[in-house]
Image (spheres, grey):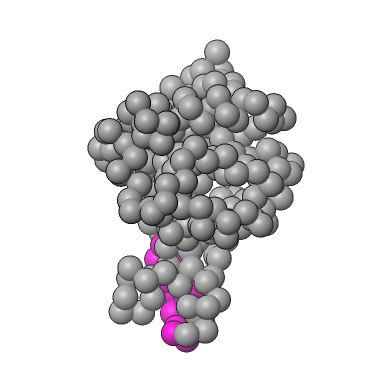
Amino acid sequence: MDASRFADRRDAGRRLAEALARLALPDPLVLALPRGGVPVAYEISRRLGAPLDLMLVRKLGAPGHAELGIGAVVDGSNPQTILNDAVVDELHPGAAYIKAETKRQLTELERRRLAYRGTTPPPPIAGRTIILVDDGIATGGTVRAALTAARRAGAARLVLAVAVAPASVLAELKPLADDIVCLATPSPFYAISLHYADFAQTSDDEVIKLLREAEGRSKA
């Protein structure tokens, strides 16, 4: 198979895991961006013998244009709002709107966290080596917010691990991470799905199953 093409997300995870193993990262915590990042992160967690959890992020939609992000809110013991200053300065959504939209997205994050992890609190990030994982990056908005939040939460070392991404986006993200491991940077870049033979949507049930398997392995 072409080195820039993956059989599925588990295949991408195994290949990323081998690259990450060479970094000899101390005491890593693997955080997946759900849902697609979870099967990738599961294989990394298994190979490194590291705990697996989620980095839950929700975009803050612009007034009247939900698909246009004015920022994002990141779940955690202290949820963080990361604004896109350029978009905020252009649209002037107002503090009241930002507060209300953040509250709405935090409610959805709470619902998802309960569905995926039950009442288990998010793991502490401070002082840890954090490996943030996704199946691919297109524009980088969600990953940017997640990296920023992890840094603010006190990550000792921050590693971004992703199967495929545009080189231009990785260059923009580079100041936010201590290390970036990416297996493919195609040019021109069209879509993440083109680099997977199987890019079927990851279900909630699969996310829950993989998290439980990883938790059981860590307790064994």
98 to 112, vertically: above or below: below
Q: Position of residue 196 (x, y in %)?
A: 32, 36
**Front position in the image: 182 or 68:** 182
Q: Residue at 42% of width from left, 41% of height from top?
A: 135
In the rendered image, which quarter contains the N terminus? top left
Query: As displayed, is residue 35 above or below residue 198?
Result: below
Overall secondary structure of the magenta section: helix
Which residue corresponds to the image point at 38% horizontal and 76% vertical from the top-left? 62
Residue farthest along the top direction in this orientation:
220
The residue at 37%/41% (across/down) is: 36
Q: Bounds of the magenta span?
A: 91-106
Compared across the picture, whether 215 is left or right of 159 comes to left
Q: Position of residue 68 (x, y in %)?
A: 37, 71
Where residue 12 appears, as percent x and y from the top left, is: 42, 31
Taking the image as drawn, is residue 131 in sight?
Answer: yes
The image quarter containing residue 47 is: top right
Q: Quadrant of the C terminus?
A: top right
Is 94 magenta? The answer is yes
Q: Is residue 157 left or right of residue 90?
A: right
* Residue 193 magenta: no
Query: Nearest the camera: 87 or 99?
Result: 87
